[in-house]
Image: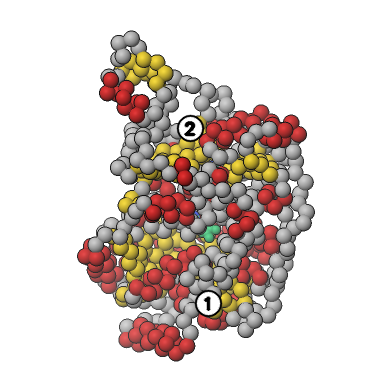
Amino acid sequence: MTNIGIATTTDVMLDYLQFTQITVLQVNATCTEITFNSYRPPPPTEIVSQYHHTDRTHYTQELLKWNGWGYKDSEFRVNNKGVIEFTGNRYPIGNKELPYFTSWVKNTFNVNLANQVKPKMLPKEYPEPIINNTFLEVITNSSINYSLHGIDRLVRSHGHSLREIFMLKKGILKRIPDIVLWPKNHEDVLWIVRVCIEFGVVCIPFGGGTSVSGAANCPEHEKRTILSLDTSQMNRILWIDSENLLAYCEAGILGQDLERELRLRGLTSGHEPDSYEFSSFGGWVATRASGMKKNVYGNIEDLVLRIRMVTGRIDEPEITLEHKVQVPRTSCGPNFDHVILGSEGTLGVITEIVFKIRPLPSIVKYGSIVFPDFESGVRALREVAKERCQPASIRLMDNEQFKFGQALRTETGWGGLVMQGLKQAYITRIKGFNWNALCVATLLFEGNSTKDICLHETKIYEITKRHGGVPSGETNGERGYTLTFVIAYIRDLGLDYHVLAESFETSVSWNQASTLCRNVKARVEIECHAKGIVHYLISCRLTQTYDSGCCIYFYMGFNYETLADPIACYEAIEESAREEILACGGSLSHHHGIGKLRARFYPEMVGDVGLSLYRSTKKHLDPNNIFATNNLDSTLKAKL
Ligand SMILES: Cc1cc2nc3c(=O)[nH]c(=O)nc-3n(C[C@H](O)[C@H](O)[C@H](O)COP(=O)(O)OP(=O)(O)OC[C@H]3O[C@@H](n4cnc5c(N)ncnc54)[C@H](O)[C@@H]3O)c2cc1C
């Protein structure tokens, strides 16, 4: 135990300290001075951990695909009538045929749906693990669950970037972890980190494995034993404090589990990245994630109040980096939470987080607005942001994404067609919009009274009307949001039919937004033509808005049937697009992070002093380079 403070106190304070479980180590004779141990969080209003510790040890391989996105029972596939359908009943389009989508896929990518490329089966053999026997003996004698099984190692060897998934489908296995460990709490992690340092073992924290930057994969050059520290068993909500609107959870909890528990209690974190079904709190912090409702709840850095991260600094008596007080804000030198946020597993293991919660809103309402073109939409969203009246979410899709969204509708027969025809006729003939230029914004309002929401809607519709926007109803908006979680499944279908697809994102100031979108699309088109790619799609949407700018997502796909090395081709195109983004004043990433994919650009982004500061921090917190994920700074290859 470390004595970290001496306080002048009174009986009242002593009572409080006992109440807050701060370990009182020493009280002087007059009881005016006490010495106390490390700060512990305040008394919980409700302890959830006692009845919520879900066993998720084998969740990944039992429930989820080993070589693709999401649940095993949910996928787009071509049925025996040649029509694409979505399987399972977890999502609104489950067990439904998608005739319009089928045509859209064929027309956009010139795909022959009879010509399937079957992915490779689950491998029977895996790379031999590199294991130090003394280390293994220590692990075997501990109470921590571990595995050397190939499949356990394989599913923790990657995230969900295009390259990683493509390789798995082709049956190409690169470096995979040698052993998987499932710590159950902070103390287990402390122990594991010390053991890793003692035996020179690399420790890669693994959350939900949804990274799209190559951050979750193992560096190919690593010769040391690689331990995948799977945080999935650290999934408890330790307490909920509804008085101070805070909650305390372990880092491995998945977004959907966290939200379910909070909602049962009329609360929410409000953090909903599109991957929230499968990504973990620790992963969100490690990558500086952003959720679709950030306008109301903030991004991850706005949501967290206190983070605990176990570092590799074993020379100190205490190796956990954390604030010693839990208050809404401090002015106490640089905020070291910001060293942890975005550290991408390179500086330590995030184990526990205190974060803000909010009462669950009683009303959720959707909306949509059609604009004559993307530029008008951008101008409208800019003004909404200027007035600071954004609803929980507001997204603007370009014309290609609008058409893609329309194609995903499930209604068939005359009703659907007639309605669609009427809407189309209204927008094009009566409003005079060009079907091949218009774009749509979808809106998600949250509130506690219909009156407040109506006022909010009115204000937004007034602003957007000044930019030619026409409200186009709740259904379009609702469909946009409910489809969010199925869109990620499309790539697996594409890969089965010679179509590659991937997204990349950036943030940019308002005055550059439209130019950036235009230039990046043009650059991708030029690159595609230069590479002989004929059937491709490049589209974008504006997903987050701020006072000074916005986040833009690009979606890209192409038919790769004739290409010798499709992934290298895609990466070269994305790299050119990234150069164009940077040239237009965009960022390297708004929320996906750097990982290994964008590490080449990292020095340019942070500058010389920034890079040397990061390197000194790395050396200080991880002097033995056991957190050798090789993210951010790609020059760090071996022991420091
Ligand atoms: C379909 C899809 C949609 C997505 N949508 C969004 C979105 O809307 N917003 C967004 O921000 N991102 C999004 N992402 C990206 C991804 O989900 C996020 O980066 C997420 O935060 C990763 O969390 P994870 O738990 O899956 O982390 P992992 O993939 O397991 O790990 C990512 C990195 O964080 C490190 N890490 C994980 N846990 C810890 C820990 N406890 N301590 C230290 N380091 C740790 C890992 O070592 C690795 O370097 C999306 C990805 C996909 C595939």
Res. 321 mark: 2
Packing grade of label 1 (10 A; few <14, some 14-19, many >=20) is some
Above or below for 125 versus 316: below
Asked if residue 558 lies left or right of residue 411, the reply is right
Return the mark for residue 332: none
Of 99 and 549, the residue lying toward us: 99
Residue 619 seen in this snapshot: no
Select label 2 or label 1 by which is in front: 1
Which residue carries the number 1 mark?
96
Q: Residues within 10 Å of mark 2 (few under 14, many from 20)?
A: many
- As measured in the structure, the alpha-carbon distance from the residue carrying label 2 to the one carrying label 1 is 50 Å
Tally of numbered tags: 2
User: Measuring 33% from the left and 9% from the top, which residue is drawn there?
Assistant: 29
Task: Report helix, strand or loop for mark 1.
Answer: strand
Corner quadrant of residue 71: bottom right
* Front one among 238 and 557: 238
Which badge, 2 or 1, is on the more N-terminal residue?
1
Q: Is residue 605 above or below residue 550?
A: above
Vertical arrangement, residue 432 with respect to residue 603, above or below: below
For badge 1, the amino acid type reads: Lys
